[in-house]
Image: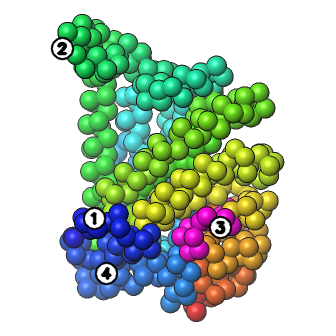
Amino acid sequence: MGSSMPENWNALTWEQKRQVRFDWWLSTEGKQFVTLEAEQNYKKTVQMFIDAITLKKPERVPIYPLMGFYIPQYAGFTAKEVEYDYEKLGIAYSKFNKDFGFDSLVGSSSALPGKLFDRLDMKFYNWPGHGVPDTTTFQAVEREYMRADEYDALLADPSGWFLHTYLPRTLGNLQGLQMFPPLTFLWEIVTVGIGAISMGTPPVQEALKTLLEAGQIGMEWAMAVGAIDSDSTAALGKPSLGGGFSKAPFDVVGDTLRGSRGVMLDMYRQPAKVIEACEKITPMAIQWGLNAANASKGPFVVMPLHKGADGFMSQKDFDRFYWPSLKAVMKAYINEGLVPCLFVEGGYNSRLDAIVDPEIPEGSVWFMFDQTDMAEAKKKLGGYACISGNVPSSLISTGTPDQVENYVKDLIEVAGKDGGYILSNGAVIDEAKPENLHAMIEAGRKYGVY
């Protein structure tokens, strides 16, 4: 597939760059399909998503699922089984994508590699069979992995701090990285031999061995999920809504460094340090998503939003601490032709005015809402950004098909008006009734035609 960057890439506008990425996604060159019908379905479906994202009226409302560990359950497996056994992983995800008529592929990479977490001895999450039952989804373990007095160390040398402090604290088998020398010793011949000594010590050697083995495990997982998803796309013509992944800089500080309690205290005790940390993390967050999107040639960067939700902080604090660095990341992706997909967990009912920002171009962002009032979201964001979501996962789990159909019908009438809407559930689904998923899909196809 012709997917290299044009020579004049930096001279293109953001719209032109995005069109290049959309063309890569839409193209079937180099992609294998089992039937001509699958290939035609692929092109038709990709165009529906492109039209919705760019605020046009597609043929009908696209239907996009946010799925969790219901998929192995549906196939008769536990969550642990699909995270450790790639044959079962393939069976589960192939069956789900075949049996349910969603427009996009549910990628098997959503089942994370338990073998890798074991090898690293990961501390900041529990996963199926490790800290939580075999049948349960993963669980964050929030602690203060960065102490309140370590902002200056992070700000002075982010890479060094992560290497020597954060990784040994959060990955038990990388303790030896505390002794790993700064590679600045390589700048003069007389220091090379002395500086290399610490790399030969048993703790550092063990950490490096762990990293090599973890890399091999990661590659095996990537090859497995790539083959599973390619086979499903070839057979069904369902596109992957792939690309990169990143986070809001404040969430990096608040989720995995200081924790909720720590960052809330810091917002009052040392607010300037919190803001400076967000600014320091911003270029790293940008590069994180950009590298993956460029490698995969997918046009999206998914960003789950956590601590900016209603009730976590005041609007004044949102405007001060959360939005500026998140906006900087979004603008960088847009400038590179990528579509930021903001997975707005919880509610953003008090944020709708703030996120309609004059510095973010119309039709450049996709907001995936969980519990936000969709009538207000459409009122505020209609004609400004594509929106999706809000079908309650609880309804899919406990409701009836008629209730699901009526909810979807009303939702499309409100949020789907004039285009710019993608039908989706609001939160990731770990429990479901299959008849309710079918009802959601059928209602979307019935009531979503323009």
The residue labelled by disc 1 is 5
Helix or strand or loop: what does disc 1 sit on?
loop
323 and 33: which is toward the camera: 323
N-terminal of the pair, mark 2 or mark 3, is: 2
Where residue 279 sits, quadrant-wise, is top right
Q: Position of residue 32 (x, y in %)?
A: 22, 73
Q: Position of residue 281 (x, y in %)?
A: 53, 39
Q: What whole-number distance in Å separates the C-alpha atoms at marks 4 and 1?
A: 28 Å
Q: What whole-number distance in Å separates the C-alpha atoms at marks 4 and 2?
A: 60 Å
Amino acid type at image mark 2? Ile
The residue labelled by disc 4 is 38
Q: What whole-number distance in Å separates the C-alpha atoms at marks 4 and 3?
A: 40 Å
N-terminal of the pair, mark 2 or mark 1, is: 1
The residue labelled by disc 2 is 189
Magenta: main secondary structure: loop
N-terminal of the pair, mark 4 or mark 1, is: 1
The boundaries of the magenta stretch are: 356-370
Where residue 294 sits, quadrant-wise, is bottom left
For residue 369: magenta?
A: yes
The residue labelled by disc 3 is 358
